[in-house]
Amino acid sequence: MYFPEIFYYYYYALLLVGSILSVLCYYTGDKRSLYIFLLLISTLIEENLRLYLKDVKLSSAYVVNLFAGIEYSFFTFYALNVRNKRSTQLWLKVSVILFLCYSVFNGILVYQSTEKYKYLITRNINIEGILLFIVYTHLLFNIDAKIPLPIFRHSEFWVAVGVLLFYGGVFVVLGLYPVLIKMNSTTTPFIYENILRPLNITLYLCILGGSVCYLINKKYLTR
C-alpha cells in the first residue's frame, strides 16, 4: 500500500523539477520550452484532480479524455516550432483542433453506462499515441544536422525518444486492456497501473533530460 505514495512523490518531483528547468530554458532562449512547462503543470493538476475524484468515488473519465486533448496540443505545438514546411504546420494545427473536439465528444460518450462505450477512454489515448508517434518520428528524423553536436545532445532528441517509448508502450498496454479485464477484472487494473508507471517515469525523465541538454548546449541550440 505504500508503493503508490512513493511513486506519486517521485512522479510529482519529476514534474516540478522539469517545470523549473523548462522555465530556465525558456528564459535562456528556448521558446518551445513554454509548451513543456504548460504540459508538466497541466499534468500535475490533472493527476491530482484524478486522484481526488477517485477518493470521492466519482468518475475521472471526462477529465482523462479532455486532458488527452490538452496533452496532444502541447506536445504538437512543441514539435510545430521545429517544422519548416507550411503544409506540415497546417496539418498539425488542424489535427490539434480535431483531436480536441474528439476528446470532448469521447469523454461524454464514456459516461454512458452501456458496454459499447465502456472502453472508449483507452481508444482516445491510443489515437493520441498514434498521432504523436507520427509527429515525433518525423521530428526525430528532421533534427537539424547543421548544429555541430551529436544527436543525443539535442534537446528535442530526448523529448522525441520519451514520447516514442511512452506511447509505443501505452499502445500495446491499452490495446490489450479490454481483453485482459474481461479475463480477470481483479488483477488487470493493478498490472495495468504498474506497467504504465515506469513508462510515465521514462517519459518525464527524457523530457527533463532534454531541458538539461539545452541548458548545457544552449549556445548551439538557441534559435
Image (cartoon, rainbow, N blue to C red):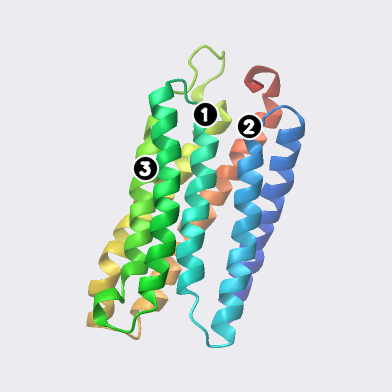
User: Which of 160 and 128 lies nearest the eye of the viewer?
Assistant: 128
Amino acid type indicated by mark 2 = Cys
- Whole-percent x, y for residue 101 in the image: 42, 56
Mark 1 and mark 2 lie on one chain; the one further toward the N terminus is: 1
Q: Residues within 10 Å of mark 1 (few under 14, many from 20)?
A: few
Residue 213 badge: 2
* Residues at marks 3 and 1 touching, judged by CB atoms closer than 8 Å: no
User: Which of 143 and 68 lies nearest the eye of the viewer?
Assistant: 68
Quarter of the image where the C terminus is located:
top right
Residue at mark 2 to residue at mark 3: CA–CA distance:
22 Å
Q: Residue under circle 1?
A: 152
- Say which residue appears at 56% left-offset and 14% top-offset: 147
- Say which residue appears at 37% left-offset and 42% top-offset: 133
- Say which residue appears at 32% left-offset and 56% top-offset: 171
Q: Residue under circle 3?
A: 133
Res. 139 in view: no
Q: Residues within 10 Å of mark 3 (few under 14, many from 20)?
A: some
Dividing the picture into quadrants, the one containing residue 182 is bottom left
* Residues at marks 1 and 2 touching, judged by CB atoms closer than 8 Å: yes
Mark 3 and mark 1 lie on one chain; the one further toward the N terminus is: 3
* Residues at marks 2 and 3 touching, judged by CB atoms closer than 8 Å: no
User: Which of 98 and 48 lies nearest the eye of the viewer?
Assistant: 98
